[in-house]
Amino acid sequence: MSKGKILVVDDDRLVLATLAYGLAQAGYTVLDADNGDDAILLAREHRPELALLDIRMEGLSGFDVAAYLREHLRIPFMFLSAFADEETIAKVKELGAVAYLIKPLDIHQIVPAVESAFAYRPAGQDLAPPPAVPAPALQQRPALDMVSLAVGVLMHRYSLPRAEALERLQQMAGASAGLPLAEQAARVVEAV
């Protein structure tokens, strides 16, 4: 029995094959595309519950695909990217991604993020993307989204595996007079 249906989009065929295989081994039904046009066609036909999108691709970018998924199909998405610059982070926040993971990643880091996204949905319901929120309103964003972004930033900045990055974020929150994790995560993301 499948844990859920996921669309994986990356123009690097090796990355795409690795992700598709790893997610299938973890129990998910995987649809894969190596470009944005095919991704949209697959999403319209098969209605996945989550999409994992590379950002920079020829033709339609991951941002273009995400905007379409959000506006027309209400399919949530997370980004997998090698880029963590300020402009990219701002666009990720604007689009309302469920998570933002920095490459290089291995499947053992991606599967927990996917499982967290599926666990976040109410029982018996599809994942629903958070509404688009302007970047200054970070405190209003869902906690899972902000924590995932912050963990991705820490993974990239300190070359940590996901679990250690989350632990570091939790330690930072505790060291800051016991701040809630989501608030510390917002501070980390704002600092970027």
Image: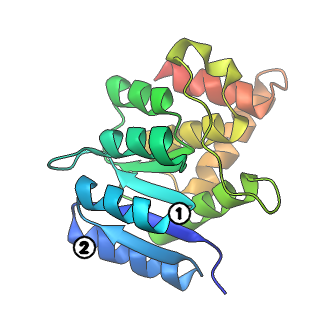
> In this image, 4 relative to 7: left or right?
right
Quarter of the view holding residue 5 = bottom right
Which is closer to the viewer, label 2 or label 1?
2
Identify the secondary structure beneath mark 1. Answer: helix
> In this image, 68 relative to 97: left or right?
left
Query: Residue at the spot x=42%, y=66% of the render?
Result: 45
User: Which sits in the foreground, 46 or 159?
Assistant: 46
Q: Residues within 10 Å of mark 1 (few under 14, many from 20)?
A: some
User: Separation of disc 2 and disc 1 at Cα?
Assistant: 17 Å
On screen, 146 above or below 104? above
User: Which sits in the foreground, 61 or 71?
Assistant: 71
Image quadrant containing the N terminus: bottom right
Residue at numbered disc 2: 14
**Most distant residue in the left direction:** 58
Quarter of the view holding residue 89 = top left
x and y percent of residue 38 in the render? Answer: 26, 62
Query: Residue at the spot x=69%, y=33% of the render?
Result: 142
Inspect the image, locate mark 2, and give the three-letter code of the amino acid beneath it.
Leu
Residue at numbered disc 1: 109
